[in-house]
Image (cartoon, grey):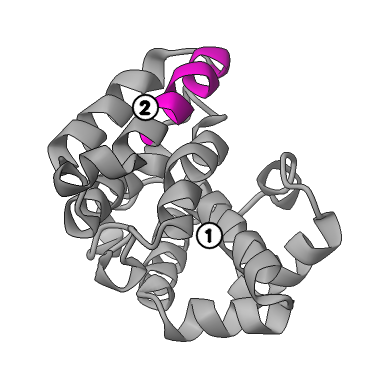
Amino acid sequence: MSDILFNLLCSLLEESEEHLNQYLPEFMSDVLDKKNSKNASASELTKGVDKFMFMISDVSDSPFMPKAFFNTIVKPLLEKNLLNTKGMEWCEKDPDEIFATEGHFKVFLYLLQWQEAQKGSAAKAQEWFKGETGLMDALARLKKSNELLDTKVDLDELCEDVENIDATHAFVTFLNINK
């Protein structure tokens, strides 16, 4: 299942945002249907999501992909407790092998915003991010990559499609990615 999910996501990179939003939610609904539960283990789904996360920042031809990926894949899996965030690497282990970071940062912001809504506060979302996931290690690797690439994060671009700008700026400060 991990390869099916990963290959499906890769094949959708050349699709329009409209097509992706039209067909991917239905696919995920089918995957998450109780009739298919033995085919969709949390372990396999997590592997597929993690594989795609490795390349989420490299999809500059599909700038809508981080948000669509989060909304149609990550969020439904989190809601069904089928995504083991602790078991994910989120990005390459070697910062020298990371050539873009913006897509990762966007997914991280969506994760924080979703967690804030689930937990009722930004502080609790930040604690989740720091403690219950492998995200802090990935964040350190991504920031190191930005240093190696001498890249600055464009906050306006990073925040252009998020819903709560004030909370997003607080999360950006928390992630310390605007320096």
**Label number found at residue 108:** 1
Instruction: Give the secondary structure at mark 1.
Output: helix
| Residue holding disc 2 | 27
> Disc 2 to disc 1, how far (Cα)?
23 Å
Percent x, y of residue 27: 36, 27
Percent x, y of residue 111: 55, 60
Tell me: 42 left or right of 105: left
Tell me: 159 left or right of 109: right
**First reached walking from the N terminus: tag 2 or tag 1:** 2
Which of the 4 image quarters holds residue 117?
A: bottom right
Q: Residue at x 49, y 37 (%)?
A: 72
The foreground one among 60 and 114 is: 114
Question: Mark 2 touching mark 1, by CB under 8 A?
Answer: no
| Magenta-tinted stretch | 17-28
Instruction: Give the secondary structure at mark 2.
Output: helix
The foreground one among 61 and 52 is: 52
Q: Residue furthest right?
A: 166
- Residue 110 drawn above or below residue 5: below
Q: Residue at x 49, y 25 (%)?
A: 62
User: Magenta part mainly helix, strand or loop?
Assistant: helix
Give the mark toward the camera: 2 or 1.
Answer: 2
Percent x, y of residue 81: 38, 63
Which of the 4 image quarters holds residue 63?
A: top right
- Residue 100 drawn above or below residue 95: above
Asked whether residue 178 appears in the rendered view, the answer is no
Q: Residues within 10 Å of mark 2 (few under 14, many from 20)?
A: some
Q: Residue at x 81, y 55 (%)?
A: 164
Q: Amino acid at mark 1?
A: Phe
Where's the N terminus, which quadrant? top left
